[in-house]
Amino acid sequence: MGQLRVGMVGHAFMGAAHSQAWRTVNRAFDLPLSARMSVVCGRDEARVAAAAGKLGWESHATDWREVVTRDDIDLIDVCTPGDTHAEIACAALAAGKHVLCEKPLANSVAEAREMAAAAATAQSRGVRSMCAFNYRRVPAVALMRKLVADGRIGTVRHVRAVYLQDWIVDPEFPLVWRLRKDVAGSGALGDIGAHIVDLTQFVTGQLIAGVSALTETFVRSRPLPAGELNGSDVGEVTVDDAALFLARLDGGAVATYEATRFATGRKNGLRVELNGSLGSVAFDFERMNELEFYDATLPTDEQGFTRILVTEPDHPYMSAWWPAGHLIGYEHSFTHEVRDLLEAIATGTDPAPSFADALQVQLVLDAVERSAATSAWVPVEVSLAGV
Protein backbone atom coordinates (compact mmCIF):
# COMPACT_ATOMS: atom_id res chain seq x y z
CA MET A 1 0.00 0.00 0.00
CA GLY A 2 1.39 3.37 -1.04
CA GLN A 3 1.15 6.47 1.13
CA LEU A 4 -0.53 9.79 0.40
CA ARG A 5 1.12 12.41 2.60
CA VAL A 6 -1.44 15.08 3.49
CA GLY A 7 -0.90 18.69 4.46
CA MET A 8 -4.03 20.44 5.75
CA VAL A 9 -4.39 24.23 5.86
CA GLY A 10 -6.89 25.35 8.51
CA HIS A 11 -7.91 23.52 11.67
CA ALA A 12 -11.23 24.92 12.92
CA PHE A 13 -14.68 23.36 12.29
CA MET A 14 -13.95 21.93 8.84
CA GLY A 15 -10.37 21.13 9.77
CA ALA A 16 -11.63 18.97 12.63
CA ALA A 17 -14.14 17.22 10.35
CA HIS A 18 -11.50 16.55 7.69
CA SER A 19 -9.03 15.33 10.32
CA GLN A 20 -11.60 12.81 11.51
CA ALA A 21 -11.90 11.58 7.93
CA TRP A 22 -8.16 11.23 7.36
CA ARG A 23 -7.79 9.39 10.70
CA THR A 24 -10.49 6.83 9.98
CA VAL A 25 -10.62 6.25 6.22
CA ASN A 26 -8.05 3.44 6.07
CA ARG A 27 -9.44 1.82 9.19
CA ALA A 28 -12.87 1.54 7.56
CA PHE A 29 -12.06 0.93 3.89
CA ASP A 30 -9.58 -1.30 2.09
CA LEU A 31 -7.85 1.12 -0.26
CA PRO A 32 -4.76 1.08 -2.50
CA LEU A 33 -3.44 4.23 -0.77
CA SER A 34 -2.89 4.98 2.90
CA ALA A 35 -3.46 8.54 4.11
CA ARG A 36 -0.64 9.92 6.26
CA MET A 37 -1.50 13.01 8.32
CA SER A 38 1.83 14.76 7.87
CA VAL A 39 1.28 18.42 8.74
CA VAL A 40 -1.47 20.85 9.71
CA CYS A 41 -1.03 24.57 9.09
CA GLY A 42 -2.47 27.60 10.87
CA ARG A 43 -1.51 31.21 11.47
CA ASP A 44 -1.15 31.06 15.26
CA GLU A 45 1.75 28.92 16.52
CA ALA A 46 0.18 27.97 19.85
CA ARG A 47 -3.26 27.19 18.41
CA VAL A 48 -2.00 25.11 15.49
CA ALA A 49 0.38 23.19 17.76
CA ALA A 50 -2.54 22.34 20.04
CA ALA A 51 -4.68 21.37 17.03
CA ALA A 52 -1.96 19.05 15.71
CA GLY A 53 -1.87 17.18 19.00
CA LYS A 54 -5.64 17.03 19.39
CA LEU A 55 -6.51 16.11 15.81
CA GLY A 56 -3.71 13.62 15.19
CA TRP A 57 -1.27 15.39 12.86
CA GLU A 58 2.43 14.51 12.95
CA SER A 59 3.60 18.12 12.82
CA HIS A 60 2.43 21.68 12.43
CA ALA A 61 3.41 24.80 10.48
CA THR A 62 2.41 28.46 10.30
CA ASP A 63 3.26 29.19 6.63
CA TRP A 64 1.06 27.46 4.06
CA ARG A 65 3.43 28.49 1.27
CA GLU A 66 6.18 26.42 2.85
CA VAL A 67 3.84 23.44 3.22
CA VAL A 68 2.72 23.65 -0.42
CA THR A 69 6.31 23.43 -1.71
CA ARG A 70 7.48 20.61 0.56
CA ASP A 71 8.71 17.49 -1.24
CA ASP A 72 7.26 15.23 1.45
CA ILE A 73 3.65 16.39 0.88
CA ASP A 74 1.44 14.87 -1.84
CA LEU A 75 -1.94 16.52 -1.20
CA ILE A 76 -3.10 19.85 0.17
CA ASP A 77 -6.44 19.92 1.99
CA VAL A 78 -7.81 23.49 2.03
CA CYS A 79 -10.06 24.14 5.06
CA THR A 80 -9.69 27.91 5.29
CA PRO A 81 -12.25 30.71 4.73
CA GLY A 82 -13.18 31.35 1.12
CA ASP A 83 -11.00 34.41 0.58
CA THR A 84 -7.86 32.21 0.60
CA HIS A 85 -9.09 29.21 -1.41
CA ALA A 86 -7.93 30.39 -4.82
CA GLU A 87 -4.42 31.41 -3.78
CA ILE A 88 -3.71 28.24 -1.80
CA ALA A 89 -5.30 25.79 -4.23
CA CYS A 90 -3.70 27.29 -7.34
CA ALA A 91 -0.26 27.35 -5.68
CA ALA A 92 -0.65 23.73 -4.61
CA LEU A 93 -1.73 22.58 -8.08
CA ALA A 94 1.18 24.47 -9.66
CA ALA A 95 3.50 22.67 -7.23
CA GLY A 96 2.15 19.31 -8.39
CA LYS A 97 0.07 18.58 -5.30
CA HIS A 98 -3.37 17.01 -5.40
CA VAL A 99 -5.97 19.31 -3.82
CA LEU A 100 -9.11 18.85 -1.76
CA CYS A 101 -10.82 22.24 -1.27
CA GLU A 102 -13.76 23.08 0.95
CA LYS A 103 -16.94 24.57 -0.49
CA PRO A 104 -17.92 26.94 -1.88
CA LEU A 105 -14.94 26.75 -4.22
CA ALA A 106 -14.23 30.49 -4.11
CA ASN A 107 -15.70 33.89 -3.25
CA SER A 108 -16.34 34.90 -6.85
CA VAL A 109 -16.84 33.48 -10.32
CA ALA A 110 -13.51 34.98 -11.40
CA GLU A 111 -11.63 33.11 -8.66
CA ALA A 112 -13.54 29.91 -9.37
CA ARG A 113 -12.65 30.15 -13.07
CA GLU A 114 -9.00 30.60 -12.16
CA MET A 115 -9.14 27.52 -9.94
CA ALA A 116 -10.95 25.39 -12.54
CA ALA A 117 -8.38 26.40 -15.16
CA ALA A 118 -5.51 25.56 -12.81
CA ALA A 119 -7.12 22.20 -12.08
CA ALA A 120 -7.51 21.42 -15.79
CA THR A 121 -3.84 22.24 -16.41
CA ALA A 122 -2.74 20.11 -13.46
CA GLN A 123 -5.00 17.27 -14.57
CA SER A 124 -2.93 16.90 -17.75
CA ARG A 125 0.03 16.12 -15.47
CA GLY A 126 -1.90 13.55 -13.44
CA VAL A 127 -2.63 15.91 -10.55
CA ARG A 128 -6.18 15.51 -9.16
CA SER A 129 -8.49 17.99 -7.48
CA MET A 130 -11.90 17.82 -5.82
CA CYS A 131 -14.30 20.21 -4.08
CA ALA A 132 -15.62 19.03 -0.72
CA PHE A 133 -19.40 18.91 -1.04
CA ASN A 134 -19.70 16.25 1.66
CA TYR A 135 -23.49 15.76 1.54
CA ARG A 136 -23.06 13.89 -1.76
CA ARG A 137 -21.42 11.16 0.35
CA VAL A 138 -24.34 10.56 2.72
CA PRO A 139 -25.41 6.98 1.80
CA ALA A 140 -29.11 7.94 1.61
CA VAL A 141 -28.28 10.76 -0.82
CA ALA A 142 -26.19 8.41 -2.98
CA LEU A 143 -29.13 5.99 -3.00
CA MET A 144 -31.47 8.87 -3.90
CA ARG A 145 -29.33 9.65 -6.94
CA LYS A 146 -29.39 5.97 -7.96
CA LEU A 147 -33.18 5.74 -7.70
CA VAL A 148 -33.55 8.81 -9.92
CA ALA A 149 -30.94 7.58 -12.43
CA ASP A 150 -32.66 4.18 -12.58
CA GLY A 151 -35.94 5.88 -13.52
CA ARG A 152 -37.77 4.89 -10.34
CA ILE A 153 -39.54 8.27 -10.06
CA GLY A 154 -39.80 8.83 -13.82
CA THR A 155 -39.37 12.33 -15.20
CA VAL A 156 -38.39 14.77 -12.48
CA ARG A 157 -40.91 17.62 -12.39
CA HIS A 158 -40.51 19.39 -9.06
CA VAL A 159 -37.45 19.98 -6.88
CA ARG A 160 -37.78 21.47 -3.39
CA ALA A 161 -34.70 22.19 -1.33
CA VAL A 162 -34.24 24.00 1.99
CA TYR A 163 -31.31 24.46 4.34
CA LEU A 164 -32.39 26.02 7.63
CA GLN A 165 -30.22 27.14 10.56
CA ASP A 166 -30.69 29.59 13.44
CA TRP A 167 -27.23 30.22 14.89
CA ILE A 168 -27.26 33.99 14.30
CA VAL A 169 -30.87 34.77 15.32
CA ASP A 170 -29.58 36.63 18.38
CA PRO A 171 -28.63 40.18 17.24
CA GLU A 172 -25.89 40.18 19.89
CA PHE A 173 -24.08 37.30 18.20
CA PRO A 174 -20.69 38.74 17.17
CA LEU A 175 -19.55 39.74 13.69
CA VAL A 176 -17.59 36.58 12.88
CA TRP A 177 -15.85 36.05 9.52
CA ARG A 178 -18.85 34.26 8.00
CA LEU A 179 -20.76 37.56 8.20
CA ARG A 180 -18.16 39.54 6.22
CA LYS A 181 -18.32 39.53 2.44
CA ASP A 182 -14.60 40.20 1.96
CA VAL A 183 -13.80 36.93 3.76
CA ALA A 184 -16.85 34.72 3.20
CA GLY A 185 -18.01 35.90 -0.22
CA SER A 186 -21.68 35.67 0.71
CA GLY A 187 -23.79 34.66 3.68
CA ALA A 188 -26.38 31.90 3.90
CA LEU A 189 -26.33 31.72 0.11
CA GLY A 190 -22.74 30.52 -0.20
CA ASP A 191 -22.35 28.90 3.20
CA ILE A 192 -25.36 26.58 3.10
CA GLY A 193 -27.17 27.44 -0.14
CA ALA A 194 -24.19 26.10 -2.09
CA HIS A 195 -24.83 22.69 -0.53
CA ILE A 196 -28.42 22.41 -1.76
CA VAL A 197 -27.50 23.75 -5.19
CA ASP A 198 -24.87 21.05 -5.58
CA LEU A 199 -27.04 18.38 -3.96
CA THR A 200 -30.05 18.90 -6.22
CA GLN A 201 -27.92 19.02 -9.37
CA PHE A 202 -26.20 15.82 -8.19
CA VAL A 203 -29.32 13.78 -7.43
CA THR A 204 -31.30 14.92 -10.49
CA GLY A 205 -28.47 14.89 -13.02
CA GLN A 206 -29.72 18.31 -14.19
CA LEU A 207 -28.11 21.75 -14.03
CA ILE A 208 -29.85 24.92 -12.87
CA ALA A 209 -30.53 26.95 -16.01
CA GLY A 210 -32.00 30.17 -14.60
CA VAL A 211 -33.11 31.79 -11.35
CA SER A 212 -35.36 34.46 -9.86
CA ALA A 213 -34.19 35.39 -6.37
CA LEU A 214 -34.40 37.60 -3.33
CA THR A 215 -32.02 37.94 -0.41
CA GLU A 216 -32.37 39.70 2.95
CA THR A 217 -30.12 40.80 5.79
CA PHE A 218 -32.20 41.01 8.96
CA VAL A 219 -29.52 42.23 11.38
CA ARG A 220 -27.30 44.77 9.67
CA SER A 221 -24.76 45.46 12.41
CA ARG A 222 -23.32 43.27 15.14
CA PRO A 223 -20.87 43.48 18.04
CA LEU A 224 -17.26 43.14 16.96
CA PRO A 225 -15.41 40.12 18.32
CA ALA A 226 -13.10 40.67 21.26
CA GLY A 227 -9.81 42.16 20.12
CA GLU A 228 -11.26 43.86 17.03
CA LEU A 229 -12.97 46.91 18.55
CA ASN A 230 -10.77 49.61 16.91
CA GLY A 231 -12.71 52.50 18.42
CA SER A 232 -16.15 51.02 17.72
CA ASP A 233 -18.24 48.39 19.41
CA VAL A 234 -20.10 47.25 16.29
CA GLY A 235 -19.44 46.44 12.64
CA GLU A 236 -21.54 46.13 9.50
CA VAL A 237 -22.90 42.78 8.35
CA THR A 238 -22.07 42.67 4.63
CA VAL A 239 -23.64 39.35 3.61
CA ASP A 240 -27.14 37.95 3.28
CA ASP A 241 -28.91 36.32 6.22
CA ALA A 242 -31.37 34.50 3.93
CA ALA A 243 -31.63 33.68 0.23
CA LEU A 244 -34.69 32.32 -1.59
CA PHE A 245 -35.03 31.60 -5.30
CA LEU A 246 -37.06 29.91 -7.98
CA ALA A 247 -35.22 27.98 -10.66
CA ARG A 248 -35.60 26.02 -13.86
CA LEU A 249 -33.37 23.01 -14.44
CA ASP A 250 -32.04 22.13 -17.88
CA GLY A 251 -33.95 18.83 -17.91
CA GLY A 252 -37.31 20.58 -17.57
CA ALA A 253 -37.85 20.44 -13.81
CA VAL A 254 -38.89 23.49 -11.79
CA ALA A 255 -37.39 24.13 -8.38
CA THR A 256 -37.53 26.19 -5.20
CA TYR A 257 -34.60 26.87 -2.87
CA GLU A 258 -34.38 28.45 0.58
CA ALA A 259 -31.21 28.99 2.60
CA THR A 260 -31.39 30.87 5.88
CA ARG A 261 -29.57 31.22 9.18
CA PHE A 262 -32.69 32.81 10.74
CA ALA A 263 -35.02 29.79 10.95
CA THR A 264 -35.52 29.91 14.70
CA GLY A 265 -35.35 26.44 16.20
CA ARG A 266 -33.70 24.81 13.17
CA LYS A 267 -30.11 23.75 13.78
CA ASN A 268 -29.11 22.02 10.53
CA GLY A 269 -32.36 21.40 8.70
CA LEU A 270 -31.42 20.28 5.20
CA ARG A 271 -34.22 18.69 3.15
CA VAL A 272 -34.56 17.83 -0.55
CA GLU A 273 -37.72 16.43 -2.16
CA LEU A 274 -38.14 15.37 -5.79
CA ASN A 275 -41.52 14.73 -7.41
CA GLY A 276 -41.57 12.76 -10.64
CA SER A 277 -44.02 11.26 -13.10
CA LEU A 278 -43.75 7.79 -11.50
CA GLY A 279 -43.05 8.64 -7.87
CA SER A 280 -41.31 10.84 -5.34
CA VAL A 281 -38.27 10.66 -3.09
CA ALA A 282 -37.25 12.87 -0.16
CA PHE A 283 -34.19 13.20 2.07
CA ASP A 284 -34.09 14.96 5.43
CA PHE A 285 -30.68 15.34 7.07
CA GLU A 286 -32.20 15.24 10.54
CA ARG A 287 -33.01 11.60 9.63
CA MET A 288 -29.90 11.09 7.54
CA ASN A 289 -30.03 7.30 7.51
CA GLU A 290 -33.45 7.28 5.85
CA LEU A 291 -35.17 8.01 2.53
CA GLU A 292 -38.86 8.55 1.91
CA PHE A 293 -39.89 6.84 -1.34
CA TYR A 294 -43.27 6.87 -3.07
CA ASP A 295 -43.84 4.41 -5.94
CA ALA A 296 -46.83 5.53 -8.01
CA THR A 297 -46.57 2.42 -10.23
CA LEU A 298 -47.91 0.19 -7.45
CA PRO A 299 -51.63 -0.62 -7.21
CA THR A 300 -53.44 2.24 -5.50
CA ASP A 301 -54.23 0.15 -2.43
CA GLU A 302 -50.47 -0.39 -1.91
CA GLN A 303 -49.29 3.16 -2.51
CA GLY A 304 -47.86 5.39 0.21
CA PHE A 305 -44.54 6.84 1.26
CA THR A 306 -42.16 4.08 2.32
CA ARG A 307 -39.34 4.61 4.82
CA ILE A 308 -36.11 3.09 3.53
CA LEU A 309 -33.54 2.59 6.28
CA VAL A 310 -30.26 3.05 4.41
CA THR A 311 -28.02 0.79 6.50
CA GLU A 312 -27.83 -2.41 4.45
CA PRO A 313 -24.37 -3.57 3.31
CA ASP A 314 -25.43 -3.22 -0.35
CA HIS A 315 -26.36 0.45 0.17
CA PRO A 316 -23.68 2.98 -0.89
CA TYR A 317 -20.63 3.00 1.45
CA MET A 318 -22.39 0.97 4.17
CA SER A 319 -20.49 -2.30 3.77
CA ALA A 320 -17.54 -0.66 5.56
CA TRP A 321 -19.48 0.07 8.73
CA TRP A 322 -21.86 -1.72 11.10
CA PRO A 323 -24.51 -4.45 10.88
CA ALA A 324 -27.80 -3.46 9.23
CA GLY A 325 -29.88 -1.09 11.35
CA HIS A 326 -26.87 0.47 13.10
CA LEU A 327 -26.79 4.15 12.19
CA ILE A 328 -23.93 6.35 11.02
CA GLY A 329 -23.50 10.12 11.40
CA TYR A 330 -22.38 13.43 9.93
CA GLU A 331 -18.67 12.65 10.25
CA HIS A 332 -18.99 9.60 8.02
CA SER A 333 -19.79 11.78 5.01
CA PHE A 334 -16.28 13.24 5.22
CA THR A 335 -14.71 9.79 5.54
CA HIS A 336 -16.59 8.72 2.41
CA GLU A 337 -15.39 11.88 0.69
CA VAL A 338 -11.70 11.18 1.25
CA ARG A 339 -12.28 7.50 0.53
CA ASP A 340 -13.48 8.41 -2.98
CA LEU A 341 -10.61 10.86 -3.42
CA LEU A 342 -7.98 8.29 -2.41
CA GLU A 343 -9.51 5.74 -4.78
CA ALA A 344 -9.47 8.23 -7.66
CA ILE A 345 -5.85 9.25 -7.05
CA ALA A 346 -4.75 5.63 -6.78
CA THR A 347 -6.50 4.60 -10.00
CA GLY A 348 -5.64 7.73 -11.98
CA THR A 349 -9.26 8.79 -12.45
CA ASP A 350 -10.88 12.17 -11.93
CA PRO A 351 -12.77 12.59 -8.64
CA ALA A 352 -16.13 14.35 -8.42
CA PRO A 353 -17.22 16.98 -7.79
CA SER A 354 -14.42 18.52 -9.82
CA PHE A 355 -13.41 22.16 -9.68
CA ALA A 356 -15.44 22.56 -12.89
CA ASP A 357 -18.49 21.17 -11.07
CA ALA A 358 -17.86 23.59 -8.21
CA LEU A 359 -17.50 26.45 -10.71
CA GLN A 360 -20.99 25.57 -11.95
CA VAL A 361 -22.31 25.99 -8.39
CA GLN A 362 -20.49 29.34 -8.19
CA LEU A 363 -22.20 30.45 -11.41
CA VAL A 364 -25.57 29.68 -9.80
CA LEU A 365 -24.68 31.64 -6.65
CA ASP A 366 -23.59 34.58 -8.79
CA ALA A 367 -26.83 34.45 -10.80
CA VAL A 368 -28.84 34.44 -7.56
CA GLU A 369 -27.03 37.53 -6.27
CA ARG A 370 -27.55 39.36 -9.57
CA SER A 371 -31.22 38.38 -9.68
CA ALA A 372 -31.78 39.58 -6.11
CA ALA A 373 -30.09 42.88 -6.91
CA THR A 374 -32.15 43.52 -10.05
CA SER A 375 -35.44 41.69 -9.31
CA ALA A 376 -35.03 40.00 -12.69
CA TRP A 377 -34.86 36.47 -14.10
CA VAL A 378 -31.19 35.63 -14.65
CA PRO A 379 -29.98 32.75 -16.87
CA VAL A 380 -27.13 30.64 -15.51
CA GLU A 381 -24.07 30.17 -17.67
CA VAL A 382 -22.99 26.57 -18.21
CA SER A 383 -19.36 25.66 -17.55
CA LEU A 384 -17.82 22.33 -18.52
CA ALA A 385 -19.29 20.73 -15.39
CA GLY A 386 -20.71 17.29 -14.98
CA VAL A 387 -23.10 16.38 -12.19
Image (cartoon, helix red, strand yellow):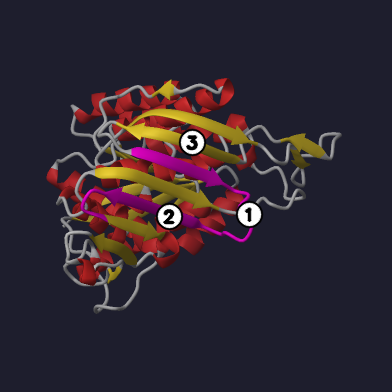
Region in magenta: 254-279
What is the distance, in whole Å, between disc 1 and disc 3 at their CAs?
A: 22 Å
Q: Quadrant of the rendered structure where residue 349 is?
A: top left
Residue at numbered disc 3: 245
Q: Secondary structure at mark 3?
A: strand
* Residue 75 position (above or below residue 299): above
Please tell me which residue is depicted at 46% across the width and 45% down the height of the picture. 79
Residue at numbered disc 1: 167
Give the number of marks: 3
Q: Is residue 34 left or right of residue 232?
A: left
Q: Quadrant of the rendered structure where residue 217 is?
A: top right
Q: Is residue 273 magenta?
A: yes
Please tell me which residue is depicted at 70% across the width and 42% down the height of the picture. 175
Amino acid identity at mark 3: Phe
User: Which residue is outermost to the right?
Assistant: 231
Q: How many residues crowd around disc 3 within 10 Å: few (fewer than 14), some, or many (20 or more)?
A: some
Dot in front, 2 or 1: 2
Foreground pick, 220 / 291: 291
Q: In the rendered image, is residue 80 in sight?
A: no
Q: Is residue 62 left or right of residue 135?
A: right
Residue at numbered disc 2: 271
Q: Secondary structure at mark 1?
A: loop
Amino acid identity at mark 1: Trp
Please tell me which residue is depicted at 33% across the width and 67% down the height of the picture. 290
Provide residue 103's location: percent of width, then percent of height: 43, 41
Q: Secondary structure at mark 2?
A: strand
* Residue 298 position (above or below residue 106): below
Amino acid identity at mark 2: Arg
Which of the labelled discs sits on residue 14, or is there none? none
